[in-house]
Amino acid sequence: MKISLISIIASIFLAGVKLLAGFLGRSSALVSDGANSLSDIVSYTVVMGGLAASNRKADSSHQYGHEKLESIVSFFLAFVILATGVFIGYRGFKTLSSGQTLTTPSLLALGAAIVSIVVKFFLWRITVKGVKATKLNSLRALAGDHLSDIFSSVGALVGIVISRLGWPMFDLIASIVIALLIIRSSFEVFSASYHVLMDASVDAKTRGELERAILLNPNVRRIDLLRTRSSGNGCWVETEICCCGHLHLHEAHDIAEEIHERVERDLPYVRHIMVHVNPCFDDDEHCEECGRNPHLKHSGKDEGQDNSN
């Protein structure tokens, strides 16, 4: 929430500076960059609202919580970023094909581009720290947007400098390059959001962490099934483990409960893990661990005990 608010305030400042300096300083690239900052204001406001909504506790109508709202917000953010890139690109191509006389940007535009790079770098750094702390997809999208904005402002700066050296067309070319970078960023945000909304499985690294955590229990002979689905900045897990087939019900329950509590404690991104215990033998096999026959009738007594009273 704090990062989104800082981003909104900074974007309002940058949009005003870049648009004013772009028009007064005769820089198409800077005007395009300013339009990008205007879309950022809308995007960051939506992100802030989405984060607040996704943090609401589970209720009777949404028993798995509201975390997917965060990915829906990121999905919307991707379309806003895409629309901005398409608009800027269209504007640049239209101006380039019109054959109109191009003007050379002033020092005012040059200074505004430098200010934009410095401010955006600061925003990117604090957002990356937030991503590492929370692993939120919306903040990851925000960090990607800040990085895209840095490249946009650098592109504007390069275009302005080359234009001032005698090639005014480069300012316009820079605005088109900025548009392409923005469009690319929108697809990256879209991909990350789609991944979560479609209940995609966790990556190989996270799956490995889950497997190692489950196998820490000495009673687990193997993992028969491990199924995951992403949700917000976390995941839900289902697993089937193989244990000795002669465990009592309460013993099997204790094993499952120990794994459940430890995994959720040690791996904070696990929202919930459901553990099912399978016996280690098939219909006509002996128990792999203790060698006992699962179908041997004991009349309520363990092997080796006298059945007489």
Image: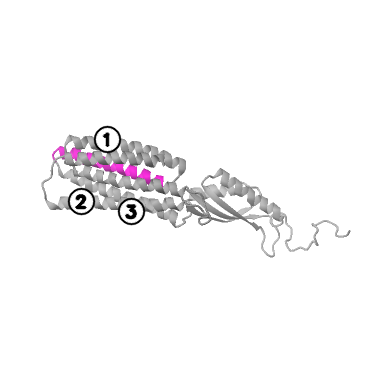
Q: CA distance from mark 3 to mark 1?
A: 27 Å
Residue 72 at x, y percent in the picture = 41, 53
Q: Is residue 88 magenta?
A: no
Label 3 vs 1, first from the N-terminus: 3
Circle 2 sits on which residue? 91
Give neighbour class at mark 3: few <14, some 14-19, many 20+ (Cα, 10 Å): some
Residue 176 at x, y percent in the picture = 22, 48
Can the viewer see residue 4? yes
Q: Is residue 281 left or right of residue 26?
A: right
The N terminus is located in which quarter? top left
The secondary structure that dominates the magenta segment is: helix
306 or 109, nearer to the observer: 109
Q: CA distance from mark 3 to mark 2?
A: 18 Å
Q: Quadrant of residue 284?
A: bottom right
Q: Is residue 160 magenta?
A: yes
For the magenta stretch, what is the residue range? 137-166
Circle 1 sits on which residue? 115
Q: Are marks 3 and 2 in contact (CB under 8 Å)?
A: no
Circle 3 sits on which residue? 79
The C terminus is located in which quarter? bottom right
| Residue type, label 3 | Phe
Q: Residue at x 42, y 52 (%)?
A: 71
Q: Is residue 208 left or right of residue 148?
A: right
| Residue type, label 1 | Val
Q: Are marks 3 and 1 in contact (CB under 8 Å)?
A: no
Q: Quadrant of residue 248?
A: bottom right
SS state under label 3:
helix
SS state under label 1:
helix
Label 3 vs 2, first from the N-terminus: 3
SS state under label 2:
helix
